Image: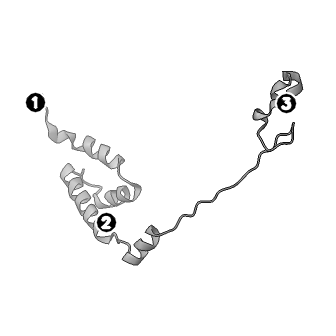
Amino acid sequence: MKQITESWDMIIIHTLVQRLDIKTKKEWELHISNKELPTLQQLYTFLEHRCNALESITTKPKSNEQRQYMCRKISPSYVSVKTMCEVCKESLAVSQCHIFKQLSSEEKY
């Protein structure tokens, strides 16, 4: 294609910056100078430093805290519901009632 790729920096920078989280985007805007256009290499360097900083401040939970979250007991609860037919007053669902099944559509409603 023989196109000059140096001029693509701004397009790539814009595309990448749009995908950053709000805090990182704000830090990037504070990092770049307003007098010069940033280069793609400057963005790469900024992101590398930002990742290193975030990785170094990320704290892992202590073993007791981690164990506390992992060892929560879950106890199932069950609800028992007895169905009673409104037609024959027996302990079964209306759809299983022989009397209800024999009724006409008008009588069912």
Residue count near mark 2 (Cα–Cα under 10 Å), binned few <14, some 14–19, many ≥20: few
Q: What is the spatial separation of the Cα atoms under label 2 and label 1, in whole angstroms?
A: 39 Å
Mark linked to residue 2: 1
Kindly identify the amino acid type of the residue bearing the numbered disc 1.
Lys
| Extreme-right residue of the structure | 107
Q: Horizontal placement of 39 versus 22: left or right?
A: left
Residue at figure coordinates x 46%, y 70% from the top left: 71
Secondary structure beneath label 3: helix
For the C terminus, the image quarter is top right
Q: Horizontal placement of 91 versus 76: left or right?
A: right
Residue ID for mark 3: 99
Residue ID for mark 2: 54
Task: Classify 66 as above or below 101.
Answer: below
Q: What is the spatial separation of the Cα atoms under label 2 and label 3, in whole angstroms?
A: 72 Å
Q: Is residue 45 visible?
A: yes
For this rendering, which residue is in front, 54 or 82?
Answer: 82
Residue at figure coordinates x 75%, y 34% from the top left: 96
| Extreme-left residue of the structure | 2
Secondary structure beneath label 1: loop
Check the image and tell me how it is coloured: one colour
Residue count near mark 3 (Cα–Cα under 10 Å), binned few <14, some 14–19, many ≥20: few
Q: Are marks 3 and 1 in contact (CB under 8 Å)?
A: no
Q: Horizontal placement of 109 versus 79: left or right?
A: right
For this rendering, which residue is in front, 18 or 34?
Answer: 18
Kindly identify the amino acid type of the residue bearing the numbered disc 2.
Leu
Tell me which numbered mark, 3 or 1, is placed earlier along the sequence.
1
Tell me which numbered mark, 2 or 3, is placed earlier along the sequence.
2
